[in-house]
């Protein structure tokens, strides 16, 4: 046998959208290596208790943050000899999305901090653990692409939101402007929203909606 | 430490397009477990020689098939306690694409066989190794989605191809019909092709093209 088993971990890029800018929740590492550097939430797969990698990510979030994100999905695996000084390691990287109010409370209570990830990560801390800056940039790029053909950005919104708020989230993540009438028509045609209550957050009352199911891939442009 | 390191492998879903239908290249497994069952090409990460998971996939293809695919990319990682009788294991699954002539020669020389993967895998062998049928179906679904917004299907064509042949490949993979004039205009606008020679394969001569670079995500519909 001419190999050792590599380390296998999960890392979670926990994102939210604050005033139209994507932010990631980071925590200073509490042990060596890379102690004190800002890091993603993550940990080893526990083969004795995790049924699969998604469960490993959920267990890690529960254990470290006592938190379940609104949306969690695997996005890619970073696996090479260089990323961890302890040796060859693979991280199954997950994207987790939640709304900003809940995440800000969580961050305050857990010693985490939210960092703006716009402008190609220019506002991330200079000193980050391992290859976590790369993992964040790759996960954000995946989210931006995915936002063009799925309902994923709906998970940044509170449970009840207006069509205008949903459009704002798409525009912010995609760095684009959409036509409101086209957006409303296409979104309602795809039937992934159901009406909730009237919302009064800004200006005149507007119909609130909630996401009833996710669409992973819709074969049309939004506007 | 309350875990053992899981096994970490790469598996390669090697696809081509024959008469408008996607096919996968499989080989009977030559050892236990699951000896004799049809399987993907794959193997363990060799931490002493593979720089990263992409290199591990390329080394595996070279060692087992003496072959380098036209296109190779990681698509997802399947990681759970059930998929291998030997214990918790993770496979970093790659999609490899090549043109059918070359792949048919390879298959003939290596004891492999090409299986039609259309109709949700109904034509795949009934007895397949491990979870390889699931891995194929997931990789094909990813390819179909990706074909909607990238140049990936260009890698199924020979080095020089006509716009009509490229349109045929998109239509076959996407299970859709595209408008030829719109398709030609949009494809040429995106500037990922350059002219080669006149091709005489069917009917009157048509301009041949080759792929000069990949576009991973284009923000428009093809027709």
Image: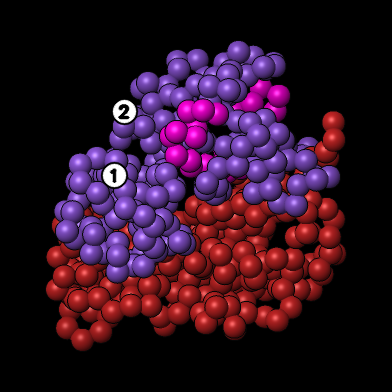
Chain colours: A purple, B red
Q: Residue furthest bottom?
A: B203
Mark before the other along the chain sequence, 1 or 2? 2
Q: In this view, does B148 lie above or below A170?
A: below
Residue B151, located in which quarter of the rendered image?
Answer: bottom left
SS of the residue at dot 1? Answer: loop
Residue at horizontal 63 percent and vertical 19 percent from the top: A29
Residue at horizontal 59 percent and vertical 83 percent from the top: B122
- Quarter of the image with the C terminus of chain A in it: bottom left
Q: Percent position (x, y) of residue B79?
A: 69, 52
Q: In this view, does B107 lie above or below A40?
A: below
Residue at horizontal 61 percent and vertical 52 percent from the top: B77
Q: Which mark is residue A4?
A: none
Residue designated by label 1: A200
Left/right placement of residue B203 relative to residue A100 reads: left
Q: Residue A119 carries which label?
A: 2
Question: Neighbour class for label 1 at 10 Å: few (<14), some, many (≥20)?
Answer: few
Q: Do the residues at discs 1 and 2 belong to one chain?
A: yes
Residue at horizontal 35 percent and vertical 49 percent from the top: A161
Residue B42, located in which quarter of the rendered image?
Answer: bottom right
Q: Give the range drawn in magenta.
A: A77-106
Q: Distance between the residues labelled 1 and 2?
A: 33 Å
In magenta segment, residue A80: yes
**Residue A131 appears in the picture as rendered:** no
**Residue A123 appears in the picture as rendered:** yes
Chain letter of disc 2 in the image: A
Q: Percent position (x, y) of residue A138?
A: 45, 38
Q: Percent position (x, y) of residue B48?
A: 71, 35
Left/right placement of residue A194 relative to residue B182 reads: right
- Quarter of the image with the N terminus of chain A in it: top right
Q: Which of A194 and B46 is in front in this view?
A: A194
SS of the residue at dot 2? Answer: helix
Question: Given this view, does label 1 or label 2 mark the residue nearer the observer?
Answer: 1
């Amino acid at each position: 046998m001419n190999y050792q088993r590599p380390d296998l971990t999960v890392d979670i890029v926990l994102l939210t959208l604050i005033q139209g800018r994507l932010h990631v929740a980071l925590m200073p590492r509490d042990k060596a290596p890379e102690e004190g550097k800002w890091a993603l939430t993550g940990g080893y797969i526990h083969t004795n208790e995790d049924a699969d990698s998604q469960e490993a990510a959920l267990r890690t979030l529960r254990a470290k943050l006592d938190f379940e994100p609104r949306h969690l999905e695997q996005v890619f695996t970073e696996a090479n000899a260089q990323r961890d000084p302890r040796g060859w390691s693979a991280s199954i990287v997950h994207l987790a999305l939640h709304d900003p109010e809940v995440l800000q409370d969580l961050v305050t209570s857990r010693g985490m901090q939210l960092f703006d990830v716009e402008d190609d990560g220019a506002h991330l801390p200079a000193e980050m653990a391992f290859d976590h800056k790369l993992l964040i940039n790759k996960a954000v790029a995946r989210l931006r692409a995915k936002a063009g053909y799925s309902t994923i950005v709906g998970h940044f919104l509170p449970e009840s939101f207006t069509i205008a708020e949903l459009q704002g989230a798409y525009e912010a993540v995609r760095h684009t402007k959409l036509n409101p009438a086209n957006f409303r028509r296409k979104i309602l045609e795809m039937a992934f929203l159901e009406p909730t209550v009237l919302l009064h957050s800004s200006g005149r009352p507007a119909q609130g909606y909630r996401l009833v199911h996710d669409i992973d891939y819709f074969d049309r442009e939004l506007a």
